[in-house]
Amino acid sequence: MKLIMTLFVFCALSLSVNAQGLYNNGAKIVTQVGSHVYITGNYRAETTGSVDAEIEIADDFYLGGNFINNVSAGIGFTSLNSTWVFNIVGDSPQQWLGLNLNAVTIPNLAFASGSYFDFSGKDINIPGNVALNGDTFQAKIGNEDFYIVGAISGSGLFDATADGHLVLTPVQNVPLLYPVGDGTNNESVTITCLNLPSQNIGVKINDTNEASSYLIWDIDGESNLNATALFRLDKSALGNLETFVHSMMRHFDGSRYVPFPNDNVTISDMETYFNITITSINQF
């Protein structure tokens, strides 16, 4: 069954609503606090005449398909203090598609175990929390940054090999985990700022394997820090390369790659992966 909206409709939904797919052709749908919307297929927003489709979400919104935004203006939805839950049905990744690719703000976001969402091309802002409820990669960050203001929970990972960074807000003396990797290997980073940070820090993965080097982490932040960073590196990501303090752990100083001082780097062999700790980092 497919629910098709062709008229301008204002409706307040207070109960759980289920649909295999929702085609919104210019309707305004308003849900009340305590309601839950379940769509196992796609949600598609269209413009009819001068009327843009919109769904105002007050509580949980479960999406099992793609979000397709073809409205002429806006983003096709308004979220209050809601949580969006991406729950894939089938083997293909969920995607954000359509003619209108504006930046997207979602109050809170959760990924069901086994789900995977491709955010390619979207600037995503999450002012609340993100729950990664799986145990493998659950989302691909696109060429725009992915901002999270709140906390990240769970064991899932972000594929961060495109141009966009996973951007978080550091707090002094609080370890900040970036659960990122190359889509296959866990290359998470934990950063602890010992002084008071003045701006956000973003992390992405450089998926560049050369004959004598492996450029892995691209960290974008301020240049006046006193930070400690813990890097996890799955051994399978290295192939035939090995880790040496001076050949592996270098940073770009604006003109060239410079080795970190030997005393600042500790590499621990954890059998299937390495933990690499670097202290006294003054810039990203």
Image (cartoon, rainbow, N blue to C red):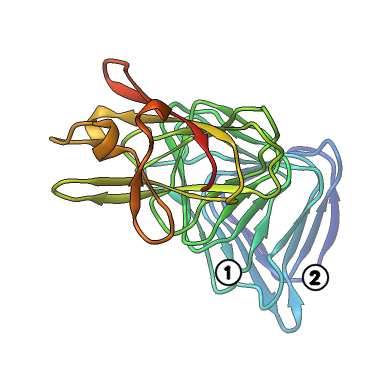
Above or below, 138 against 167 in this view is: above
Residue 6 image point, x, y percent: 70, 70
Give the residue drawn at x 70%, y 79%.
Answer: 48
Other-residue count near label 2 (Cα within 10 Å), few / some / many at <14 / 14–19 / ≥20: some
Is 63 in front, or is 135? 135
- Quarter-of-image position of residue 149: top right
Residue 54 image point, x, y percent: 74, 63
| Secondary element at tag 2 | loop
Is 226 in front, or is 177? 226
Is 234 in front, or is 100? 234
Q: Is residue 71 left or right of residue 266?
A: right
Q: Which mark is residue 101?
A: 1
Q: Is residue 105 left or right of residue 284?
A: right
Q: Nearer the observer, disc 1 or disc 2? A: 1
- Quarter-of-image position of residue 44: bottom right
Is 244 in front, or is 28? 244
Q: Which mark is residue 201?
A: none
Residue 79 image point, x, y percent: 77, 52
Give the residue drawn at x 21%, y 46%.
Answer: 213
Q: Is residue 217 left or right of residue 63?
A: left
| Secondary element at tag 1 | loop
Q: Which mark is residue 8?
A: 2
Other-residue count near label 1 (Cα within 10 Å), few / some / many at <14 / 14–19 / ≥20: some
